[in-house]
Structures are given as C-alpha cells and as structure tokens.
Image (tube, rainbow, N blue to C red):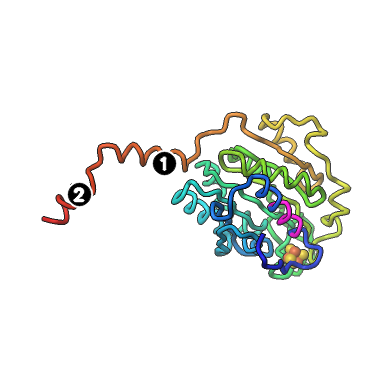
Amino acid sequence: KSDLKPIWCPGCGDYSVVQGIYRALAAIGRPPHEIAFISGIGCSSRIPGYTTAYGFNTVHGRALPIAQGIKLANPDLLVLAAGGDGDGFSIGGGHIAHLIRRNIDITYIVMDNQIYGLTKGQLSPTSQKGRTTCTSPHGSLENPVNPLLYVLAYGAGFVAQASPTDLVGMAAIIEEAIRYPGFAFVNIQSPCVTYGEEAQQIKGLKAISETLESLGHDPSDRLAAMNLAQNYGTKLNLGVFYRNPEPAPTYDGLVRERQAQLSQGAPSKERILDLFIKK
Ligand code: SF4
C-alpha cells in the first residue's frame, strides 16, 4: 500500500477493489519489488499507484501487451494488469484473445462499471442497450459485450466475477486468480457513483447477486460456466465461473524452456567474438 491517497469520487467502487487487491497480495506475501502492476487509462487505471509494486500507467487499452512484455522479459515477476471496461473491451479489446491463446501467466482485473467515468459518462462497450448517457441521449442502440462469455469462449483457464458487495469474497477471488498458473481474468462489478445508474450501485447489485457456490456450480465445467455467464447484465453471479483443473503450459514457461534448449551447444561469447568481431 503506497502513501498516495486515491482521488476517486467518494463512494466509487474502486476503493473496495484496491482493498481487495491489498488483502490478496498480503495473503500471497511476495515483496513489492517482485510484483509489476500495469494499467491503461481510466479512473480504475490509477490503481497501480496505490500499491508499492512496480507500476506502469500506460496508454489507453495497452495494459495487456505491456504486461505481456514485462512477463516475458522477467518471468519471475508476479504480473498484474488492471483497467476499466472501456480500456479492456473497446480500445484494448483485440489484445485479450492473444494473451488467452498464449496463456501468459498474468492476472487481469477489469473494474466493469458500464460507463466511461474519467471522460464524464459516455457509453462503454458493456453499457446496456437503451442506456441514456451524454453520448446517447435517446438511448443506446447497441448490445453490450459480455466480458465473461468473451474470455470463456477464447479459452481462458481462470474466469471469475466479484463485486464490492462482498469484499471478503472479492479478496479471496483475486488471491485465487493470482495463484492460478496461467492467464486469469476477474471481472469486478465496481459501481461508478457519479455516472452509473441506480441499478448498478451497491444496493442494486446486492439485489441481483447470487454466489455460484450457492447454485452448486462446478467450476471445472466450461460449458456450465458459459451458460451461467449469459446471466451477465441481469444477475450478478459471484465466484469462480471456470478454473481449468489441468492448467495448460504457459507461454512464458515455454519461452524459458526454448531459450534453455537453444543455449545448449550455442557457441560461447568468446567464440562469437572470435568469429565475427575480432576478424
Ligand atoms: Fe469512480 Fe465514476 Fe468517479 Fe470515476 S467517475 S472515480 S468510476 S465514481
């Protein structure tokens, strides 16, 4: 936890999310210099600055490729990426598929509030159809992206949803995502108290929340997870939708193996100098 005080609007859901991240990281116990926390642009993307991990507040939508580069350059780092729904599913929407197919060992936390808060309340990719905002005064004509279904369909090994309505549960889910050996995605319904609708505030979210555990959901069943993910926007299902019981090899691990293989039998530095430079 850094000394920097968050400057989110009083009551913003992101205050709870940062508390959940503190609790998860404290439970994991890695020192700050072994953690890199990357974000894009948006209210929620301020979050790395509120930790003492290495932080990089990058450009809009580019948290994931930068996090990927950091993980490949130094696989020993614990790498987190975070941002909002616009950053992750609009500007940066094309990157998620590639991190999932490579299975880079990164935890990606999206603070999903269905609005662009930092730029004062425009439609985001997860805004519900019919939503009125400053850019859609007569109601949106577009269907929203379903973040859960999106990452499940691409084959993510760990997919969960949490909310500040249950801080203890949210911290436990973030911790589990960080411990998962591969790409892990956590969608957090984090209310925007300034531009969000009534139904998306804590009281509204509590009214539609239901834990996946109470539904008897088996998180090793991807198809069941995809069925439940279709509740997005009407119910708030909290918990782990899918956790691959047999995690696939990670790309960062495979790159490390390949480097070790290629370095066997490779000419020494002295020999290279002899061959190419000294002559
Ligand atoms: Fe939070 Fe919304 Fe304020 Fe941004 S505008 S800090 S998302 S309440």
Image point 64% across, 59% down: which residue?
51
Q: Front-most of 231 and 214?
A: 214
* Callout 1–callout 2 Cβ contact below 8 Å: no
User: Which residue: 67% across, 67% down?
Assistant: 4
On the image, numbered disc 1 is attached to which residue? 256
Tell me if residue 19 is in the magenta stretch: yes
Q: Which residues are magenta?
A: 15-21
Q: Quadrant of the C terminus?
A: bottom left
First of labels 1, 2 by sequence position: 1
Q: Secondary structure at mark 1?
A: helix
- From the image, give the main secondary structure of the stretch colored magenta: helix
Q: Amino acid at mark 1?
A: Arg
How busy is the neighbourhood of tag 1: few (under 14 within 10 Å), some, or many (20 plus)?
Answer: some
Query: Taking 71 as reference, is 175 left or right?
Result: right
Q: Is residue 81 magenta?
A: no
Q: Which residue is mark 2?
A: 270
Instruction: Pick the quarter of the image with the N terminus.
Output: bottom right
Which label belongs to residue 56?
A: none
Residue 217 to residue 230: above or below: above
Q: Residue at x 54, y 51 (%)?
A: 34
Q: Find numbered disc 2 in the image and state the secondary structure of the residue it sits on.
A: helix
Indicate which label's residue lies in the foreground, 1 or 2.
Answer: 2
- In the rendered structure, the answer to whether residue 197 lies left or right of residue 49 reads right
Residue depicted at 50% across the width and 39% down the height: 250
Q: Position of residue 173 (x, y in %)?
A: 71, 43
Q: Quadrant of residue 33?
A: bottom right
- Confirm or reject: label 1 Cβ below 8 Å from ligand 1: no
| Residue type pointed to by label 2 | Glu
Figure disc tally: 2
Residue 136 seen in the current view: no
Residue 18 at x, y percent in the picture: 71, 56
